Image (spheres, rainbow, N blue to C red):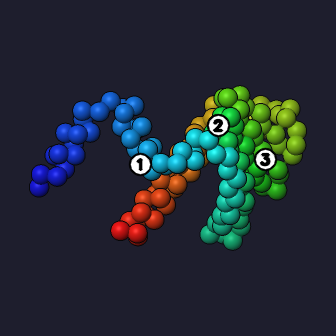
Amino acid sequence: MMVPYVALALLSSLTAKELLDRSIAYHDPEGRWGRGAFEITELASRPDGTGHRNILRLDNARSWFELDSSVNGRALSFVVENDMVVGRLDGNPNLSADELERYRLKPAQVLSRRNRDLYRRKSRLSTSRYLRRRRRQ
């Protein structure tokens, strides 16, 4: 089968930035992800019958990300703007070292979660656009 080898040859001639730029152009031709502001509500349930709700707000043009959630009946939120993190527990931004650890609100943990959530959202956007295109063909 020759096709995979042709694709590999084409891809290997691109730099990482060129490959990324082409991927973004294909999956988000209107550039919505880079300039849009989004609010996403996630509802999740666990096998034990409990559930939780996360509200994610993001504005990639401003490099701003916010998460509101509830953990063990406590209101948890954090905002990341230009890699600066502000976490709150029950509205209080002055958290003890134990609370920062227990609720994973240390800056490195929050940035990691933000990056993971942004990647997942972008992947879902790309997948849904791909599936819509495939259905039209």
Q: Tag 1's secondary structure?
A: helix
Q: Earlier in the sequence, mark 1 or mark 3?
A: 1
Coordinates of residue 39 in the picture (x, y in percent): 70, 53
Q: Tag 2's secondary structure?
A: helix
Amino acid type assigned to the residue bearing label 1 in the image: Tyr
Coordinates of residue 69 in the picture (x, y in percent): 75, 52
**In the displayed structure, does residue 4 sit left or right of residue 58?**
left
Alpha carbon distance from label 2 to label 3: 25 Å
Whether residue 57 is visible here, answered yes or no, is: yes
Amino acid type assigned to the residue bearing label 3 in the image: Leu
User: Residue at the location (68% across, 34% down)?
Assistant: 62
Coordinates of residue 87 in the picture (x, y in percent): 77, 37
Q: Compared with residue 41, is residue 61 higher up or lower down, i.e. above or below?
A: above
The N terminus - image quarter: bottom left
Choose between 50 and 53: the one closer to the eye. 53
Residue 26, numbered label: 1
Alpha carbon distance from label 1 to label 2: 20 Å
Q: Tag 3's secondary structure?
A: strand
